[in-house]
Every structure is written in C-alpha cells, then in structure tokens.
Image (cartoon, rainbow, N blue to C red):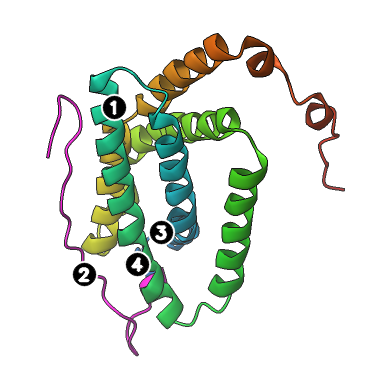
Amino acid sequence: MTDARMTLRAMPFVFEPSNEHWNPGHWNAARPEFSQVVNSASLAMPFLEPYLIRSMRAARGQITDPVLQAEVDLYIRQEAAHYKQHQLFNETLRSAGYTCIDAIEKQLAADYSKLEKERSLRFNLAYAEGFEAMALAIGQMLIEDRVHLFGDSKPAVASLVLWHFVEEIEHKSVAYDVLHQAWAKLFRDNPAGAAKLDTARLAEPVPVPS
C-alpha cells in the first residue's frame, strides 16, 4: 500500500539465533559499540511505537482532512510493522543470554503506560511529534553514513534499522500535522481548557546527577 510519500512494505527478516560461534548482540563485529547502541534502542520499540500508535488513534477523531486521516492510518501500519520486527530481533538477544532485558522491558512498559494514563492527549501528541522529528535527523544520518556504520555487518539487522528509518523519513510530518490539526480543533472547542498549562509540573525541578 502506498500514498504519495509512504509505502507499506512486508519485510520477512530472519535473524540468526545464537550459537557457539555467534552472538546476535555483536551483529557488527567492526563496530561493537554501535551494535550495542542499536540493540538498546531496539528494546524500546515494542513499547514506544504502540504508545505512538495509541496516541495517534486517540487523535484521529479530531481530524477532518481525509488525506491526513489516510496518512494516519498508513503511519499506524508502518509503526506496527516496525515494532513487530524489533520484537523478533529482541527475542534473539534474549535467547543469547542478555539477562537485563526483562527488567528493561518491565520499566519501559510502566513508563509508557504512565505517560498515556497521566498526561493529556496534547502531551502525548507532542511527544509523538518530538520523537518523529528526532527520528528524521537520525534516519538521515544513518542513511548517509550507512557504509561506515553497517559495512560488513549482519545484513538482517542492518536492513532492519535502515528499513525502519527510511519509513520514519517517509512519515516524518504526520505527527506534526495531527498535533496541529487536532490541537487547533480542541482549542476552538474548549479554549479555556486547551490554554490551561500544567504549571505545577512545569515548576518541578529537574534532577541533576551529582
């Protein structure tokens, strides 16, 4: 399925399981530090991206533009495909003996559940827009430096990351457009409530590491 800028791709990645000669966490032997950066980010995807999907679904009813509605639907399907593939990769990491994964996943699940339950739709949409803006910059860097970062690495993991970020670039402005349209409608419907800031939380001090 495609529109003018987004394509839904079925990607049948097969991630090599661990064995006595291979640890899937070290999928780029030439750049082990970069391997671990990617592994860490991958752990977040099955929690972050469903949160983004739920936020966009919650806002879809505020959207009146049929073109943007269709883009939201395709955005959701792209993000769902991403986190499902990351789940598969993450399971190869778990099977390789990364015992920290269970605790990390538990914390991620709790954090995103708390955001969704305790923060406003406006906040959650702004979070989604901020993530997508960051992902755009990261995606451009990964693609421009793909030979340096992914050369001679395991092709399934390299392809997972590059495919993911190509699609992040494709839907780069959807969250921004939804935030703009949905929040404009909320402001028109309830200007007093929409303009109210959570001043108590804004006043909370930011912890600084000692």
Main SS type for the magenta part? loop
Determine which residue is flagged by label 2.
14
Type of amino acid under label 1: Gln
Coordinates of residue 195 in the picture (x, y in percent): 67, 14
Res 88 quadrant in image:
bottom left
Q: Considering depth in this image, is 14 or 199 the residue closer to the camera?
A: 199
CB under 8 Å between discs 3 and 2: no
Q: Alpha-carbon distance for marks 2 and 1?
A: 33 Å
Indicate which label's residue lies in the foreground, 3 or 2.
2
Q: Alpha-carbon distance for marks 3 and 1?
A: 41 Å
Res 157 quadrant in image:
bottom left
Type of amino acid under label 3: Arg
- The stretch of residues the image draws in magenta is 1-25
Indicate which label's residue lies in the foreground, 4 or 1.
1
Determine which residue is flagged by label 1.
69
Q: What element carries label 2?
A: loop
Q: What element carries label 4?
A: helix
Quadrant (top left/top right/bottom left/bottom right) for the N terminus: top left
Going from the N terminus, do you reach mark 2 or mark 1 first?
A: 2
Coordinates of residue 91 in the picture (x, y in percent): 39, 73
CB under 8 Å between discs 4 and 1: no
Q: Considering depth in this image, is 122 or 64 the residue closer to the camera?
A: 64
Type of amino acid under label 2: Val
Q: How crowded is mark 1: few (under 14 residues within 10 Å), some or many (20 or more)?
A: some
Q: Which mark is residue 31?
A: 3
Residue at (48, 47) in percent of width and height: 51
